[in-house]
């Protein structure tokens, strides 16, 4: 994949790791143009068989993605009312980032609100900065509601009561609260987030790609009733178990000290050593 048709997103590639940096001054408003690039990138990532990890970050230290362009919403509201669709294009984009075979990580170093928050919630992981990252759903105060999957994703992440507080109250949720409530994976120091996300992306990308992809798919099945999810897990586990790659990696795990006292005390480091072979 070329990833060469973007102006508001700067795309870089390091093997199976794709990084997109949003650069849409002055505050990374999701204009129709930026939305179009994000939607196109989702399609391109989904179709890229070699992309294993995707990181979205911002060139602006104060704003990740501010929110969807309110002026564009006013223009839509002043036009003819069309039919209500079950899933609009923004929903489709968010769902694509959630379900694609590529692992998606949002590196949120500044404010994120409205549609930017909704897009971030569709990613597999979110990391923020203590004292900098602020999450806000500003729709209800201006007479609408989150229409880009926010009323559905936020309760699933932080619970119904807390989602009501954030959405109905239009409040700022700081990084520490967002981490405690489950919106962020971690709230990190400003000088630590880039190294942490980069190290995690490289670590994931070093593992067998099919294991990463099917593990994400299996975790996605956790939204199903437990018995159905377990059936999916069993099928995907067996798909991997009988591959040459799995047999080779499992044998190497034992060779390096897996299932010994010394090895199991450092199993995360040992697993990384297996991935180097």
Image (spheres, grey):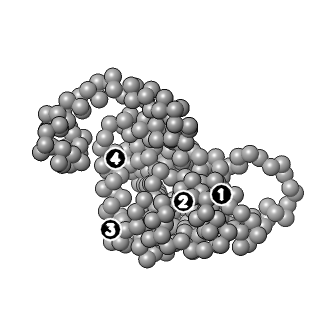
Q: Which residue was labeled with disc 3? A: 192
Q: Quadrant of residue 167?
A: bottom right
Q: Is residue 19 left or right of residue 115?
A: left
Of marks 2 and 1, the one in the foreground: 2
Do the numbered discs 3 and 4 sit on residues whose CB atoms are within 8 Å?
Answer: no
Name the residue furthest bottom: 131
Q: Which residue was labeled with disc 2? A: 158
Q: Quadrant of residue 250?
A: top left
Q: Is residue 226 visible?
A: yes
Tag of residue 204: 4
Q: Is residue 249 left or right of residue 5?
A: left
| Marked residue nearer the N-terminal end (2 or 1) | 1
Q: Residues within 10 Å of mark 3 (few under 14, many from 20)?
A: few
Of marks 3 and 1, the one in the foreground: 1
Asked which secondary structure carries label 2, the reply is helix
Of marks 2 and 4, the one in the foreground: 2
Residue 157 position, x and y percent, is: 54, 56
Tag of residue 151: 1
Asked which secondary structure carries label 3, the reply is loop
């Amino acid at each position: 994949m070329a990833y060469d048709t973007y102006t508001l997103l700067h795309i870089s590639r390091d093997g199976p790791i794709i990084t997109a940096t949003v650069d849409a001054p002055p505050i990374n408003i999701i204009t129709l143009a930026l939305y179009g690039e994000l939607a196109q990138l989702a399609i391109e990532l989904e179709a890229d068989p070699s992309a294993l990890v995707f990181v979205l970050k911002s060139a602006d230290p104060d704003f990740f993605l501010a929110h969807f362009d309110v002026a564009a919403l006013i223009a839509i509201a002043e036009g003819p009312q069309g039919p209500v669709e079950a899933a609009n294009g923004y929903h489709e984009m968010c769902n694509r980032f959630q379900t694609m075979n590529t692992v998606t990580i949002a590196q949120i170093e500044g404010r994120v609100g409205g549609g930017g928050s909704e897009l971030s919630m569709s990613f597999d992981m979110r990391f923020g900065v203590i004292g900098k990252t602020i999450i806000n759903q500003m729709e209800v105060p201006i007479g609408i509601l989150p229409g880009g999957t926010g009323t559905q994703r936020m309760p699933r992440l932080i619970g119904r009561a807390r989602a009501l507080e954030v959405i109905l109250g239009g409040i700022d949720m700081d990084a520490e609260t967002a981490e405690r409530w489950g919106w962020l994976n971690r709230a990190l120091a400003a000088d630590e987030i880039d190294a942490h996300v980069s190290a995690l992306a490289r670590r994931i990308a070093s593992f067998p790609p099919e294991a990463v992809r099917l593990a994400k798919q299996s975790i996605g099945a956790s939204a199903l009733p437990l018995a159905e999810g377990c059936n999916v897990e069993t099928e995907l586990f067996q798909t991997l178990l009988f591959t040459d790659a799995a047999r080779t990696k499992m044998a190497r795990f034992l060779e390096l000290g897996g299932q010994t006292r010394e090895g199991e005390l450092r199993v995360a480091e040992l697993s990384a050593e297996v991935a180097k072979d």
